Amino acid sequence: MIVSTDLEKLREDVKIWLGDNAPHDWRDAYKTLSHSGFADAQRAWFLKLVDGGYAVPHWPEEWPGGGRSLAEQKVIYEELAAADTPRLLLSFLSTYHAASTLFECGSEDQKARHLPGILRGETWCQGFSEPNAGSDLASIRTRAELHGDRYIINGQKIWSTMAQYADKCLLLARTSSDGPKQAGITFLLMDMKAPGVSVRPIHQIQGDEEFAEIFLDNVEVPVSERVGAEGAGWAVAQATLASERGLTLMELSYRMRGALRRIAKLIRDAGREDDAGILRDFASLATEIDATCALADRYLENRMAGIERHGDASIVKNSYSRALRAYSLFGLRLGDLDEQYQAPITYGDLNTGNWMADFMNSFAWTIAGGSEEIQRNIIAERILGMPREPKTWLVHDR
């Protein structure tokens, strides 16, 4: 059991380390970076965190900085947010989704081959969604046919975050069409440099290229890179997707609360400190963000106590996505017309200070990680106990 003095000592250690190592003026630097320059900057910051022991506190204790309790992880992410450090966008999927998949479902050989590479800066992408198989993931059509000791893969993936920079891929492919759709899916670890793999970045409306399409043409994946049994990929994928939500939402919420300082500066710079309407709306926004932070805190506290209901994370996720949209819209409102014509590259961050780009990017959060509609269904069914099908007495003849 970690006592409060231990946590305060950890907090002070993290603050001191960040004071010596956190990058300064990175927001301005990111605005002028090319996409490849952004990837280089992200890798450099990640490797510095690895050296400091703060990159993977959620990994087991045999790894650098690992073995931290949820309470300790919370302290680390609170301080990273308070110091306004760059979010680890490029390595996020590697350290959470890929690592958690390997820890929970991977073989010892797979762990030994892939986990050290992540800490050296190797990046992973996710090959799950396909055209016409996004929210209905079980409808994927990418095929994996077994030939001797390897699978031959053909198909297409889409909306793969930063796949153009990835070294490896968490891939779902169909190995059978018999039985339920979920039963014929297999989980594979694919080398993105393998012959037959081609990647095409998707140019987004705000100028970013955060996502990409992946085309697979007779790509060979060794059977040794299969995670779990053939046809068991659906269960493995659920472990992958459930790996990060609590701490991520807490960190994002705290970052947004810290970014209220940017809104306050906008109000002062615009000379609107005495505008009653602006001050009222600022107070309303601050309250909404505080409520989101409180929900994230309670969710984590319940997890620390061993209490977790299916649907609790959905409440936090929906609260965060609404607050983020309100935050970026308020910032856009305070800017003048010139604000709407800034170069809109954001690299997926939520607080660039480019308010038009931030506002457009905020809508991605109503879909990413499960759409708001799906989250509401989960809340209704898992927490409120509402039926999946409408009661017959709710249907009226006309």
Image (cartoon, rainbow, N blue to C red):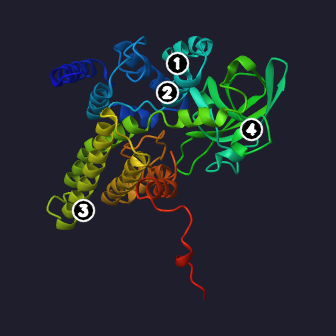
Seen at 43% across and 22% down, the residue is 46
Specify the quadrant of the image occupied by residue 45.
top left
Indicate whether 18 appears above or below 35.
above
Report, in whole angstroms, how far the alpha carbon at label 1 lies from the one at label 4. Answer: 29 Å
Indicate whether 389 appears above or below 116.
below
Q: Do the residues labelled 2 and 4 touch (CB within 8 Å)?
A: no
Residue that badge 1 annotates:
118
Q: How crowded is mark 3: few (under 14 residues within 10 Å), some or many (20 or more)?
A: few
Q: What residue type is labelled 4?
A: Gly
Residue that badge 4 annotates:
184
Mark toward the viewer: 3 or 1: 1
Name the residue nearer the viewer: 18 or 230: 230
Report, in whole angstroms, how far the alpha carbon at label 1 lies from the one at label 2. Answer: 8 Å
Confirm whether residue 38 shows in the render: no
- Give the SS element for disc 2: loop
Q: Are marks 3 and 1 in contact (CB under 8 Å)?
A: no
Residue 98 picture location, percent across and down: 55, 26
266 displayed left or right of 225: left
Report, in whole angstroms, how far the alpha carbon at label 3 lies from the one at label 4. Answer: 51 Å
